[in-house]
Image (cartoon, helix red, strand yellow):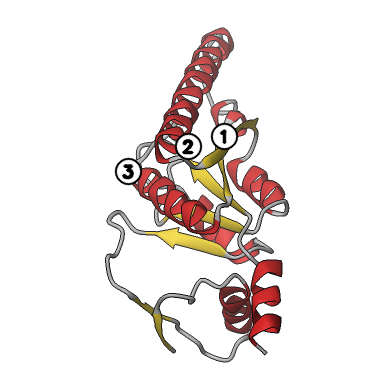
Amino acid sequence: SSDTASAERQQYMLRSVLVGIDGSAYSAAAVELGMRWAQRWDATLVGLGIVDAPTIGKAQPMPLGAAAYKAQRDETLLADAHHKVAQFLAHCAKQCAKAGVMCQIRQEVGSPAECLLLEAQRYDLIVLGQHTFFHFETQEQADDIHHIVLKQSLRPVISVPLALPMGQAVMVAYDGSPQATRAMQMFQTLWLDSSHEVHV
């Protein structure tokens, strides 16, 4: 009945969206999509910034007597990472406030993949840029965090391209595998298809 469908929809409405924020253009697109969906479902957007201390402090081969230099260099990079992550999160909070979106910001220190997978258990949906740059202090190219989270997360993960699509249709790739089945179930459970034409 329509009353039953309405009750189910209320029960499974999207209530929280976790967005991984790394300061990149892909991350900005992820925040934008996260805000759109948070507005649509009156959900809370949680912006997660991560100081990648393990990679910054990773042991490296160095000449004799260079340990003091590395320690100073690591301390400088950590301080800079804390500052940058705080800026990323402040910008996210400002955007959400301007859009009227409920927002929480969290800063964690540790392995980006581990932090994201641990935090993901507390929220309905994870939104990441199609390419992630959580190692921003130590490398300029994209890292592998996006792929790790996609493979291991127990929650649905939305992978956001650099430019958000403007279409009104959804294409679902389905191959009958357990992963595809789970993705389809979560897609329907969260009512992400409620206003779009869906092609499987």
The local crowd at label 3, few if under 14, some if 14 to 19, many if 20 or more residues have their Cα within 10 Å, is some
Question: Which numbered dot is residue 135?
Answer: 2
From the top left corner, tell me how far across and down residue 175 is, in percent. 52, 90
**Residue 46 higher or lower than 83, as above or below:** below
- Residue at x-position 47% and y-position 37%: 135
Q: Residue at x 51, y 71 (%)?
A: 192
**Would you say 169 lies left or right of 103 here?**
left
Q: At 49% from the left edge and 62% from the top edge, which residue is drawn? A: 158
Farthest residue, direction front: 3
User: Can you give x and y, in whole percent of width and height, for residue 50 in the image?
Assistant: 57, 34
User: What separation in Å lies between label 2 and label 3 (alpha carbons)?
Assistant: 15 Å
Q: Nearer the viewer, mark 2 or mark 3?
A: 3
Asked whether the residues under the numbered discs 3 and 1 touch, taking CB atoms below 8 Å apart as contact, a structural biologist would say no
Q: Which mark is residue 50?
A: 1
Question: On the rendered structure, is 130 left or right of 184?
Answer: left
* Location of mark 3 (residue): 25
Which element is circle 3 on? Answer: helix
Where does the image place residue 90, in percent across and percent down from the top left? 47, 26
Look at label 2 and name its amino acid.
His
Total numbered labels: 3
What crowding class fits label 1: few (fewer than 14 Cα within 10 Å), some (14-19), or many (20 or more)?
Answer: many
Comparing marks 2 and 1, which lies closer to the viewer?
A: 1
Amino acid marked by disc 3: Ala
Three-letter code, disc 1 = Ile
For the residues labelled 2 and 1, the Cα–Cα distance comes to 9 Å
Element type where label 2 sits in the image? loop
Asked whether the viewer can see residue 137, the reply is no
Residue depicted at 52% across the width and 21% down the height: 62
**Mark 3 or 1, nearer chain start:** 3
